[in-house]
Structure formats: C-alpha cells, structure tokens
Image (tube, rainbow, N blue to C red):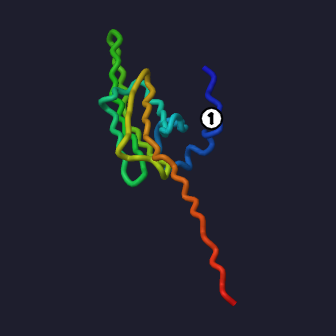
Amino acid sequence: MVPDLFDLLEAPFAALRPMAGPQMRFEDYVKDGRYILRAELPGIDPEDVEITVANGILTIHAERRQEEREGQRTEFRYGSFTRSCALPPDADENDVRATYDKGILEISVRLAEKEERTKRIPIEQRQS
C-alpha cells in the first residue's frame, strides 16, 4: 500500500498537534447555495456520530467500537474522534442536513442569499 501524499507531508508535524490519535479528514465546498462538508469516517456506525452547531462552529464527534472474531482470534478497534470547523459567516444554523454513505459523512448547511449592500450617497451642495 502506498501512503497518501498528505500523510507523508503531515507526518513530521504530527507530534506538534494538540491531540494525539487519528484525525478525521475533511473536504468542503459550496454547491447550489449550500456549504458542503464531507468527512471520512470508515467503519463507524452513524448512530455513534454526534453533530452539533453552535455560534458558527460545526463539531463532529464519532466513536468507533468494533470487534472482529476469526476462529479463536478476537480483535478490538475503538477510539473517539472530534473535529470542529468554522462555518461561513452566512451559514443558516437552522438548516443543516447530514447523510452517511459508505464511510463518508456529508453535512450540508444552507447559505443565506447575499444581499447587495450598495447604498448610493447623495451629495449635498453648499450655498456660498
């Protein structure tokens, strides 16, 4: 297996991170008036994922509890992951949707329509 390029680039800096342990990978973009955030969460049951939004911050907390049995051998995998990101300033915290499919959590947040805030300023002429 060939390591991901970003894994190689991040490896020297892993010790500088405030949290130890695995991290969730995010990607985000804007599409059709919605902010889309996708997170890789392979092998995690969606019931073990909590998504919260408060004060412009979206937080994902997930816990992995997995047990594999093969003959006389048992292997456990467990751990928790938390990651937060700032939402765009025009995000509507009351319109957030989440779906999970094949290890990818996708969260979408409606963005408010941008209003034109251009105001024409009249010029007053002084009487001399």
Q: The residue under label 1 is which amino acid type? A: Phe
Q: Which residue is mark 1?
A: 6
Residue at image coords 60%, 34%: 7
In the displayed structure, would residue 47 be above or below residue 1? below
**Residue 100 rendering spot, x and y as whole percentages:** 39, 26
Q: Residue at x 56, y 50 (%)?
A: 16
Quarter of image, res 3? top right
Taking depth in this image into account, of 14 and 108 the one nearest to the observer is 108
Percent across and percent down for residue 112 are 46, 47
Which residue is outermost to the left?
Answer: 47
Would you identify the image quadrant in which residue 83 lies? Answer: top left
The residue sitting at 62% across, 35% down in the picture is: 6
Q: Determine whether 126 is above or below 71 in the image.
A: below
Residue 85 appears anywhere in the view: no
Q: Is residue 16 left or right of residue 70?
A: right
- In the visual, does 2 lie left or right of 48? right
| One can see residue 30 in this view | yes
The picture places residue 90, in percent across and down from the top left corner, at 47, 50
Image quadrant containing the N terminus: top right
Q: Which one is nearer the viewer's eye here, 117 or 72?
A: 117
In the image, farthest residue toward the front: 127
Instruction: Name the secondary structure under disc 1.
Output: helix
Residue 98 position in % (x across, y down): 38, 33
> Which residue is at the far right?
128
Label total for image:
1
Identify the residue shown where x is 51% and y is 49%: 114
Left or right, 53 with respect to 17, comes to left
> Dot 1: few (<14), some (14–19), or many (≥20) neighbours within 10 Å?
few
Instruction: Name the image quarter holding the C terminus.
Output: bottom right
Q: Is residue 80 above or below residue 74?
A: below
